[in-house]
Amino acid sequence: MRSVAVFCGSSNGKSSIYVEEAAKLGEELAKRNIGLVYGGASVGVMGALANSVLQNGGHVTGVMPRFLEEREISHKKLSELIVVDSMHERKAKMTELADGFIMLPGGPGTLEEFFEIFTWAQLGLHQKPCGFLNINQYFKPLISLFDHMTTEGFLQDKYRGMSISAENANELLNKFDKYEPPTVKTYITDQQT
């Protein structure tokens, strides 16, 4: 794995643990020589993650829409900053550059980015691992929702396994190394085969 895209908040969150664990992920990425691809901001969990990768000698590529870059929230010390025209282009570029996707705590934008990438994997548009770092049990309700979707028949078991989660960066990246993508989604039911 050469690079990982990370979706995360531009806020710090209420507890310092979010920034601290983002920094630990950054340190682990740099240690493993895995480049970071992220939204390009200098603030919040995003900034803490990027700063950690850089401070530990790693490579960081930011991808930021022009309208955000013009608001001067872009990180000025990145290895590379790619400015695109829209949020859609941002996700497409991040997908192109990354070999896997991690979600850290964040708000609706973070969830939207992760779910689009997760859906693309389910549809076979890529075969890259998708996971989230469950810092401070932040994603406990989401894990329950994935289980509920599976129980209620809206998410097949084989796709439930695509949402990789772990309590720490080392464990999550080890799971990424062992990831085997499921077969591509089909709409043929067992009765039709």
Image (cartoon, helix red, strand yellow):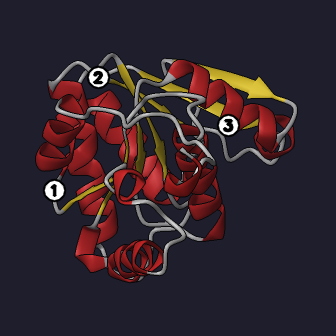
Give the alpha-carbon distance from disc 2 to disc 3, as whole Å. 19 Å
Q: Nearer the viewer, residue 192 or 91?
A: 192
As helix, strand or loop, the secondary structure at mark 3 comes to helix
Q: Residue at x 37, y 37 (%)?
A: 182
Mark 3 surroundings: few (<14), some (14-19) or many (≥20) residues within 10 A:
many
Q: Residue under label 2, please give it.
A: 34
Task: Answer above or below: position of 139 versus 99.
Answer: below
**Residue type pointed to by label 3:** Lys
Location of the N terminus by quadrant is top left
Going from the N terminus, do you reach mark 1 or mark 3 first?
3
Q: Is disc 2 placed on a helix, strand or loop?
A: loop
What residue is disc 1 on?
A: 168
- State the residue position of label 3: 91
Task: Identify the image quadrant of residue 168.
Answer: bottom left
Q: Which of 171/59 is in front?
A: 171
Q: Earlier in the sequence, mark 2 or mark 3?
A: 2
Q: Are marks 2 and 1 in contact (CB under 8 Å)?
A: no
